[in-house]
Amino acid sequence: MTVTLADAFDEPAFVPYLAAGDPDFESSLSYVEALAAGGADVIELGLPFSEPIAEGPTIQQAIVRSLESGMTPERYFEFVEALEVDVPLVCMTYYNLIYQFGPEDTDPVRPFVERAAEVGIEGVVVPDLPAEEADRLGGYCDEYGLDLIFIVAPTTAGDRLDRMMERVSGYVYVQARLGVTGARSDLSDQTEETLARLEGHDVPKAVGFGISTGEHAEAVVAAGADGVIVGSALVDIVAEGHETGEETERTAGKLRSLAAELKAGALAGKERRPRPEGT
Amino acid sequence: MSQPDTKFGEYGGQYVPEALMPAIEELTDAYERYVLGNEDGFVDEFEARIEDFGGRPTPLQRADQLSARYGVEIYLKREDLLHGGAHKLNNALGQVLLAKYMGKERIIAETGAGQHGTATAMAAAHLDMPCEIYMGRRDINRQRPNVFRMRLNGAEVTPVDVGRGTLKEAISETMRDWASTVETTHYVIGSIVGPAPFPAMVRDFHSVISEEIREQSIEKFGELPGAVVACAGGGSNTMGAFADLLEEDVSLYAVEAGGSSLSVDEEAGVAPHSASLSTGEEGVLHGARTKLLQDSHGQIMESHSVSSGLDYSGVGPELAHLVDEGRVTPAAVDDDAALEAFHRLSQEEGIIPALETAHAFGFLETVAGPDGDGSVELPETVVVNVSGRGDKDLEAVIEETDKRELENAPRMEVFDP
């Protein structure tokens, strides 16, 4: 993999999320590859945990489907090895799976990060691990050359924000609104306020939570985001395909075209940005 | 002013989504100022209300029949006589009052057996706060009287359908609500679980139980008891009954739900028990590092108990730490023994206990009954925390008793149509 995470944001980036193994290993490989074909710049690949407290119903169901099809952390790494995409991958999971991975007598967390690095994962984002508890994971990420991505919420400000900005690498995940993941029909005012607080911090800002259309992507990038993260709207396509017994290829085609729409929206958003004087 | 405990050895901490961190900082600050520092007379108001509205202090009563049966002095700490029928009001009233001092406008809570939900609904009505309770679908079906009680007190009850529909799912769903509404809403967590400062704060609201045990023991028999026995799910009545006695020469027994067996079905992701102190391994769930029922990959297992209040895959981090330190001894009592103890207390002492509480009495029978294994020699005086009354469990008890050959169960034909 030659592209680093930060490089992926040279132009407005499209960052899709899917739960690995949803609804099964083979179909899921095709779906992730379809996102890459549709223009994904980074892919956030979920490793399913049984208690996903940051997820709304859409992604909860994806996680259930994936777990029921036999997904485990080791199987996840095999999934990553089997993927044929030339896009940086970020592992999104919950801390207990990272903590428990590997033989019992080793230092917790190290085996997970080591194995993630070995299969070519570029970064990790852990929704239930605030910066305060992230020293151990951060240390191993530094050692193995992975980026540790933090989520900045609409409620994150002041000293906490500064401390997070000191630790963050790769990009920041800007949570567009309070609440849990899930596709929405509108955008939140909280996005612009959060982006404004991040101004002056030299790290790419990718906005997620609720983005579902090319128009949303355009508006978010126009508001100053360096990228858009989209999960539930894509997972909806996988869920529908699974429920209706649609052929994998057809579902993959739908994913590819929504991906292309979202990427085009992100690029169009850049054109709408107010240009700073002198450039 | 004392500092709040955020870690208990390696356990505890704050493993929550970033969106909740500012609320947790705000809560920590409020806990320090009002609960630990008595700012604006918070503690005085709490104590006055838990007396007048709650009915504290609860009695410490000698159990005559059980004392004769086990050959030692058995005393009952009657938390079942607290308003609402369980110890849960101590914490619910404390937190709802705290939310009011913090200027929050809405209360949310999860509930398993419905005891914490009913206590929160009562406290919210008493203090005039809107309240929404999340409850697993399965628990709604097995604890219907409590659902009606919550609604009668004006609370919304929202069913949780994901997973197995018990306490674990209800906590996850309440955390999701809180992540959306954190600026106006306080989450009244129902046990000594969750991110700091909850475990320490909930313990503090319940520690009145052990403070009263101390005073009343000296009054009744001139010394501290040799042992205190309490059931443990998340562990709030347990820590409440232990907190003030940790530094004393008092044996402390935390009795968990042994369910139908202490083995696990790794393939199905199910543990047929809820004994995380006795059999769990360290991990991170619902905001804290603690002992958990989990599979070899770290996925959380579904727990089981005949008692919904003990049916949880985790346990309070402080209790996990005290067990590791050897200060608290865990024990597991299975469904059969708990039911048997339920009937004994009902018939011999005239007290119908909650199924949760029945586990603590099952422990006495297991170690010191006529067929006891003698694994623990009971000291001269033992206090058992009667954490709640069993009215809510009647349907479940009749159904579960019917499935078993319990020698001491009464005849229930009268209930046939």
Image (cartoon, helix red, strand yellow):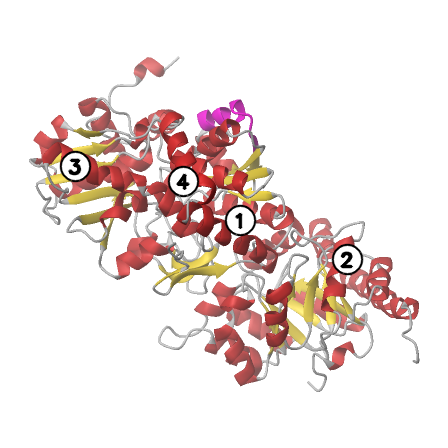
Secondary structure, mark 2, is loop
Q: Chain of mark 1?
A: B
Asked if the magenta segment contains residue B153, the reply would be yes
Q: Which residue is mark 4?
A: B43
Name the residue located 17 percent from the left edge and 24 percent from the top edge.
B348
Q: Secondary structure at mark 1?
A: helix
Q: Which amino acid type is marked by label 1? A: Ser
Instruction: Give residue A194's position: percent from left, percent from top.
Output: 73, 61
- Contact between marks 4 and 2 (CB within 8 A): the answer is no
Q: Nearer the viewer, mark 3 or mark 4?
A: 4
How far, Cα to Cα, is label 4 from label 2?
46 Å
Can residue B259 be seen at all in this image of the molecule? no
- Which mark lies nearer to you, 4 or 2? 4
Name the element at disc 3. helix
Disc 3 and disc 4 in contact, CB within 8 angstroms: no
- The residue range painted magenta reads B144-157
Query: Which residue is tagged 3?
Result: B217
Q: In the rendered image, which residue does mark 1 sit on?
A: B172
